[in-house]
Amino acid sequence: MGMKSDIELIKDGKRLDGRGVNDLRPITIKAGVLERADGSCYVEWGGNKVLAAVYGPQECLPKHIASPHRAVLTYRYNMAPFSVEDRKRPGPDRRSIEISKISKEALERVVLLEKFPNTMIKVFVEILQADAGTRCAALTAASVALADAGIPMRDLVTACAAGKIGGEIVLDLGKKEDNFGEADVPVAILPHTKEIVLMQMDGQLTPEEYRKALDLSIDGCTKVYELQKKALRERYVEGVD
Ligand code: UDP
């Protein structure tokens, strides 16, 4: 973010990949793609390829982290070594630990954890290919996987980023836009109440620009939500067990 470059990120209202300022990248969502997990989801979002798997509610291990009041939710965001241009060193790093923490906190706002005391619900997200916006794609996939597992929730969590490139506020930054743009604002909401459950900012924006980016990312979330519902509906129509 904010690297100096001669690349013109936006020209006559068109972006590098031909998108307009308010356009999402192409997104496909499929629920129920893994047989061994209780729930799963595969998302392609532009160049991002993301797989989410959910287990539980199941016995809480280690036992000392169990709660008699609610299920313990865990979230692991992991990038495959081959997911990025320079090989990603396997294992957790500061960035993936941070993303896992805030994504877990977002999901804790929707999962009815109090229904399953003394258990745990585990969410794993594997980034198979990364092209900017992976935390949003991951959280979007994770909430569909939770629904696919039949875990009761108040709502889905839907995520999408907006940002600033070439002086303009745009939706859903791609890799070059993320690298050479001015700001990136990932947001996750509960689509019914528009409650914000994740909000971050990389780069700099004025308060007015920030408001505009926030509104735009919420618009993006609304579109992503339709695709999440479609994926879950298709899962039942297909009647996979
Ligand atoms: N990235 C990378 N190596 C890393 C982490 C990130 O190449 O170790 C790339 C990857 O394409 C990622 C992008 O940088 O999608 C933007 O990363 P950021 O931390 O902004 O998170 P994201 O936008 O993916 O949620």
Image: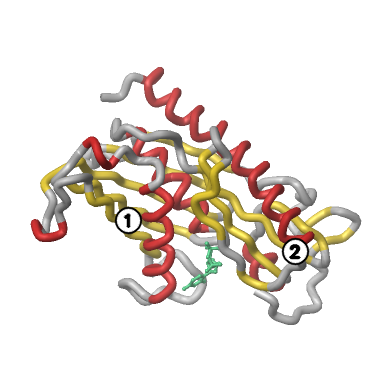
- Can you tell which mark lies on residue 75? 1
The percent coordinates of residue 13 (x first, y second) are 86, 54
| Residue furthest bottom as drawn | 4
17 relative to 105 in the view: left or right:
right
Quadrant of residue 12 within the rendered picture: bottom right
Q: Residue at x 66, y 73 (%)?
A: 203
- Can you tell which mark lies on residue 207? 2
Mark positioned earlier in the residue sequence (2 or 1)? 1
- Can you tell which mark lies on residue 184? none
- Quadrant occupied by the C terminus: top left
197 relative to 18 in the view: left or right:
left
The percent coordinates of residue 17 (x first, y second) are 73, 55
Amino acid type of disc 2? Pro
Q: CA distance from mark 2 to mark 1?
A: 32 Å
Quadrant of residue 185 within the rendered picture: bottom right
Q: Residue at x 20, y 39 (%)?
A: 116
Is 133 rendered above or below residue 233? below
Quadrant of residue 8 within the rendered picture: bottom right
**Helix or strand or loop: what does disc 2 sit on?**
helix
**Helix or strand or loop: what does disc 1 sit on?**
strand
Other-residue count near label 2 (Cα within 10 Å), few / some / many at <14 / 14–19 / ≥20: few
Amino acid type of disc 1? Tyr
- In front of the other: 196 or 137: 196
Is 40 rendered above or below residue 88? above
- In front of the other: 86 or 21: 21
